[in-house]
Image (cartoon, grey):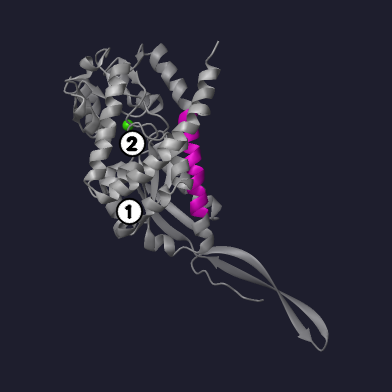
C-alpha cells in the first residue's frame, strides 16, 4: 500500500503517505510527507499550417494546450508552424521517423506516397464533415486509415474539419460550363484532376504565391478555404467573384498523426487524454468554422463588394461526372485506393439517402416562407 511511484525530474507534487504500522495489536498512524516527482514528457508537434492560421494553426495550438492541462503538465507539446522545424510537406516524414512525435495537417498532402490518403482529407462530391466523422468513427474508415499509415509507423486521428469550403475566387463571371473551360485554376488534389477532365487546367501553387498569381492574371481563379480564412488572406483584393459551393472540398478533415513508438510509450491514461483531446479538437474546429464563416462572408460582400454567386448547374453536373471518373481511375490504378474507395462508396450511398430525408429535407423546410 505504501508504494511510491518514482517519476523522476523536477515537477514536484506534495503527497502525504499514511503508514499504518501494526504494533502489538494497536495501530499507530505515522504520516510522512513524500515529494513525488512527475516526469514531464516533452513532444514536438510539426504542422503544415502557417503560424496561427485561423482555425487550423490555432487549432493545433489549442490542442497542445488542452493536452498539457488535461495531463496536469505531464505531456508538454511544443507546436511548430510550417517551416519552423520542417517544411509543411515534410510533416509526414518527420513524424514517421520520430524527428517530431506528432503532426497536424491534412491527409491529401501525402498522396505522392499514399494515393488512398486522399480519402481521409476530402473527396470531390464526397462526405461533408458530419458524414466523414461517421464513416471514420462508425463506418470502418478509421481501421482503413490506420492500416494505410501503419507501414509508416504512424497512427492517424481526425483532429478537425473546416466544413464545406467555398468554390473559389474568379476574376470573371461563370455562367456555364463553357465559361469555365480554358481557365487556369489553382486547385490541388483530386479537385485539380477533376478540373482537367472538364476542360480547365489546374495549377498547384504554394500559399505564398497564390495571391500574386491571381492578381497578375497568371491564374484566373483559385480555391482556398472559406470566408473565415479567405478574408484573412485578402483574396478579395485579387478577384471579385466568389463562387459556391466547394464541390471539391465538401468537408476537409484535419489529421493529427502520431509516431507509433512515441504514442505506444505513453502510459495508458496519457493515451486516453490524447485521444479525448483530439476528439474535442475535431468538434471545436468545426464549431469555429461554422460560427465564423458567415460573419466573414458578410464582411466580404458588404464591405469589400465581393460578388457572391452559385456555380451554374451544368458545370456542377459535369464536375460531378468527372469526379466519379477520377475516383474510379484512382481506385483502378491502386489496390489500396480501391479498398478505401469501396468502403467510402458503401457508406456514402446509405448516408446520402438518410440525409435526403433528414439534413437536406430539414434545411429546405427551414428555408420555406
Ligand atoms: Ca481548399
Which quadrant of the rendered structure holds the C terminus? top right
The residue at which mark 1 appears reads as 148
Some atom of ligand 1 lies within 8 Å of the CB belonging to the residue at label 2: no
Q: CA distance from mark 2 to mark 1?
A: 17 Å
Towards the viewer: 279 or 288: 279
Q: Can the viewer see residue 88 in this picture?
A: no
The residue that appears at 41% across and 47% down in the rendered structure is 141
Query: From what the image shows, is residue 83 above or below residue 247?
Result: below
- Residue in front for this viewpoint, 61 or 175: 175
Residue 123 badge:
2
Q: Quadrant of ligand 1?
A: top left
| 279 sits left or right of 18 in the view | left
Of residues 67 and 195, the one nearer the viewer is 195
Q: Main secondary structure of the magenta part?
A: helix
Residue 323 in percent (x, y) is at 28, 32
Q: Is residue 4 magenta?
A: no
The answer to whether residue 274 is magenta is yes
- Magenta stretch in the rendered image: 273-291
Element carrying mark 2: loop
Q: Is mark 1 within 8 Å of ligand 1?
A: no
Amino acid at each position: 500500500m505504501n508504494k511510491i511511484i518514482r517519476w523522476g525530474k523536477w515537477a514536484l507534487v506534495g503527497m502525504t503517505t499514511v503508514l499504518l504500522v501494526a504494533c502489538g495489536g494497536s495501530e499507530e498512524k505515522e504520516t510522512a510527507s513524500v515529494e513525488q516527482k512527475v516526469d514531464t514528457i516533452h513532444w514536438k508537434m510539426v504542422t503544415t499550417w502557417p503560424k496561427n492560421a485561423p482555425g487550423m494553426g490555432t487549432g493545433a495550438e489549442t490542442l497542445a494546450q488542452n493536452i498539457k492541462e488535461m495531463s496536469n503538465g505531464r505531456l508538454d507539446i511544443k507546436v511548430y508552424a510550417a517551416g519552423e522545424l520542417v517544411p509543411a510537406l515534410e510533416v509526414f516524414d518527420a513524424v514517421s521517423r520520430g524527428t517530431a512525435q506528432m503532426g497536424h495537417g491534412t491527409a491529401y498532402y501525402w498522396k505522392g506516397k499514399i494515393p488512398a490518403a486522399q480519402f481521409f482529407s476530402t473527396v470531390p462530391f464526397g462526405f461533408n464533415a458530419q458524414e466523414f466523422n461517421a464513416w471514420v468513427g462508425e463506418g470502418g474508415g478509421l481501421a482503413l486509415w490506420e492500416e494505410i499509415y501503419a507501414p509508416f509507423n504512424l497512427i492517424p486521428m481526425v483532429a478537425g474539419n473546416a466544413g464545406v469550403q467555398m468554390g473559389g475566387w474568379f476574376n470573371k463571371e461563370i455562367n456555364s460550363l463553357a465559361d469555365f473551360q480554358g481557365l487556369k485554376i489553382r486547385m490541388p488534389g483530386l479537385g485539380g484532376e477533376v478540373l482537367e477532365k472538364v476542360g480547365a487546367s489546374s495549377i498547384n501553387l504554394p500559399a505564398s504565391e497564390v495571391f500574386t498569381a491571381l492578381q497578375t492574371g497568371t491564374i484566373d481563379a483559385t480555391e482556398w478555404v472559406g470566408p473565415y480564412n479567405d478574408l484573412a488572406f485578402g483574396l478579395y483584393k485579387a478577384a471579385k467573384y466568389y463562387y459556391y459551393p466547394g464541390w471539391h472540398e465538401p468537408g476537409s478533415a484535419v489529421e493529427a498523426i502520431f509516431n507509433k513508438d512515441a504514442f505506444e510509450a505513453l502510459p495508458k491514461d496519457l493515451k486516453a487524454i490524447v485521444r479525448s483531446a483530439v476528439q474535442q479538437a475535431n468538434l471545436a474546429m468545426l464549431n469555429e468554422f461554422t460560427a465564423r464563416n458567415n460573419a466573414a462572408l458578410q464582411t466580404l460582400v458588404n464591405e469589400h463588394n465581393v460578388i457572391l454567386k452559385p456555380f451554374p448547374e451544368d458545370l456542377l453536373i459535369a464536375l460531378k461526372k468527372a469526379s466519379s471518373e477520377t475516383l474510379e481511375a484512382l481506385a483502378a490504378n491502386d489496390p489500396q485506393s480501391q479498398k478505401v474507395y469501396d468502403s467510402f462508396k458503401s457508406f456514402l450511398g446509405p448516408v446520402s439517402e438518410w440525409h435526403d430525408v433528414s439534413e437536406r429535407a430539414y434545411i429546405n423546410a427551414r428555408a420555406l416562407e
